[in-house]
Amino acid sequence: MRIGELSGRTGVPVPTIKYYVREGLLAPGELTSPNQASYGDAHERRLRLIRALLEVGGLSVANIGEVLVAVDDKQRSTHKLLGAAADLLVPGYTGDGCATLADGDADGAPDAELDADPDVVVARKKVADLIAARDWHVSPDSPQAQALTTALAALSRIGHGGFAEVLDAYATAAEGVARADLAHVGRGPAREDLIEEVVVGIVMGDAMFAALRRMAQVDGSSRAFGTGGAAGPDGLPG
């Protein structure tokens, strides 16, 4: 197909497609004449992935490049491929494998003052204990674990450290959701499809889960404290 048809099928403007080619995100088309190139299904799939990473995942062009390098590395296992994409979607991720802890250094590495912060120290232990208790194959220094540490430390700072008592219940729910996620992701035959599923699943899945959680909270509140009737448009029992 010509670049105009590729643009029409993907919704990506021609100048943007040419920019992706210049940046190395998209392979050049096959030259059919000095001024014409032909593009195929692989280009369409790659453009769809780039759009998902950019528009849904909110990744920078540089970080998209990192993911695409992993996709094209056929020696990289599916586990490491999905991990590379998931790491980039962690809030505070710096692009060097670190998730920035609040008040830490710009490069994501905790400074000495942060190491001495009692809220952070306690939060790190809680996260490490959770990982050990559940036998999760996750490093306590991973971006995901650091993001959880940041959240727990913030709760403690604002006087709501007791909320961490629900951490184990959250972990149990997260395991169930993760199993459902991976069962769905496993259907994708191509590596590009896998990454697109992960990006869309993490970002939109988080939004779906947050909405479902709030709906369940409204229902639970109605049953425990309200009339037990259906909630109205304002979320309160009707």
Image: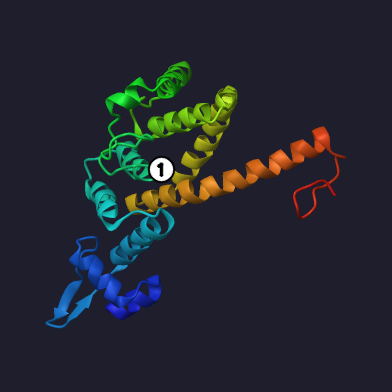
- Considering depth in this image, is 21 or 234 the residue closer to the camera? 234
The residue indicated by pointer 1 is 91
Q: Tell me where residue 96 appears, x and y as whole percent.
A: 25, 40
Q: Secondary structure at mark 1?
A: loop
At a point 29% along the width and 54% down the height, the residue shown is: 64
Could you say which quadrant of the image residue 105 lies in? Answer: top left
Could you say which quadrant of the image residue 104 lies in? Answer: top left
At a point 21% along the width and 71% down the height, the residue shown is: 29
Residue 3 lies, with reference to residue 51, above or below; the image says below
Is 94 left or right of 173, judged from the image as shown?
Answer: left
Is 142 left or right of 220, judged from the image as shown?
Answer: left
Q: Tell me where residue 225 appears, x and y as whole percent.
A: 82, 34
The residue type indicated by label 1 comes to: Pro
Q: Can the viewer see residue 39 in this picture?
A: no
Q: Tell me where residue 219 appears, x and y as whole percent.
A: 76, 40
- Considering depth in this image, is 188 or 179 the residue closer to the camera? 179
At a point 27% along the width and 32% down the height, the residue shown is: 109
Q: Can the viewer see residue 234 in this picture?
A: yes
Residue 120 lies, with reference to residue 14, above or below; the image says above
- Considering depth in this image, is 52 or 145 the residue closer to the camera? 145
Farthest residue in the left direction?
Answer: 34
